[in-house]
Amino acid sequence: MADPISSPRIYLAYTADELERYYSPGALAALEALGEVVRNDTGSVIEKAALVDEARDCDIVIAHRSVALDAEFFERKDARLKAVIRGAMDVSTIDVDAATRAGVIVANTSSGFERAVAEHAIALAIDIARDMTRAREAFLAGTEQPTRQGMELGGATLGIAGMGRIGRELARLATALGMRVVYADPVAEAPYECLDFPEMLAIADVVACLAVSVPETRGLFDDDAFGSMKPGSIFLNLSRGELVDEAALERALDAGILRGAGLDVGSGLDQTPPLHLARRPDVVATPHSAGMTAAARNVQAMDTVDQARQVIEGRVPDRAVNGSALA
């Protein structure tokens, strides 16, 4: 345990836009009650070595997921810096090993957005099943409306790839709609039918990609996976863009294997779906916004405050990803 920090200074690396979108007013007030908060007033994202001077004489840096922190940052960091707190779960753009060598704690937050993302998945599925966006655009354009029959989710089978917290919440909502839930996950256990991945794909009317992004899951949904899916099924991705071979997804759409795809993530900037896919009439795309609700935003923002409080008290925070190495 380290000594408590007296007169703490906290650098809040969020841009003004990120503060508005991702950091709740209540969390900002709670953070300011902990010590002096220095804001990023440059109007742009500051990261890596450029952040060294901006965060000079600060004990803690709190950064949105847009901020990457590499080995050079930790090699040149101010001697006063004790912790970097990510306002998200993902710390993949932080060189945690370099932080550990420099004696800097790296902490993240809980997800906080399980319900928001699960509700968003249901909304995407309903939109595609009932051709809502497609029909609206045709109606507003004054063209003949689509005559394709709608698909009811009640009685359909939902296959979930990755039964984590979001998957469990999605399963709960889907069950309430009268859907049968099956899942594929090599480690998770849940009160639903667990199947091998190919078997799940073959029977599901709606497939939701919610697997974690690790080397083993990169490109999980490729030509073989889409080729195994039930004709006329719906594909949803609310996890990470790299889990899907987007060229394979396009081929599956072109071949009519899928009724449509609902994408909240993809290979675009900040994990948004690429525009060439988003513009397709058989795709409903949202700009990585599934978790952007007031409730979810407040949970993660307040988590950063809680982590900062623990650091100021001289403790290794409970969400430190390198805590065991620095304890």
Image (cartoon, rainbow, N blue to C red):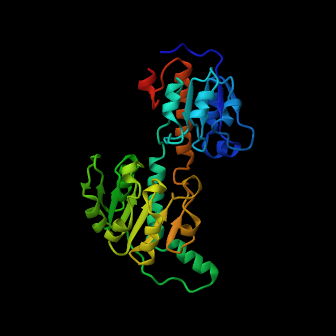
- Foreground residue, 245 or 12? 245
Q: Would you say residue 154 is visible in this rendering?
A: no
Would you place residue 41 above or below residue 307 in this image?
below
Identified at 47% across, 29% down, the residue is 320
Would you place residue 95 above or below residue 77 in this image?
below
Where does residue 182 sit, x and y in percent of width and height? 28, 58
Residue at the farthest top position: 3
Classify residue 84 by image quadrant.
top right
Where does residue 315 sit, x and y in percent of width and height? 49, 19
Identified at 56% across, 40% down, the residue is 298
Where does residue 183 sit, x and y in percent of width and height? 30, 56
Would you place residue 174 above or below residue 14 in this image?
below
Would residue 30 be found to the left or right of residue 283 on screen? right
Identified at 54% across, 44% down, the residue is 295
- Which of the image's four quarters has the C terminus? top left
Would residue 297 be found to the left or right of residue 13 on screen? left
Would residue 134 be found to the left or right of residue 199 on screen? right
Q: Would you say residue 52 is visible in this rendering?
A: yes
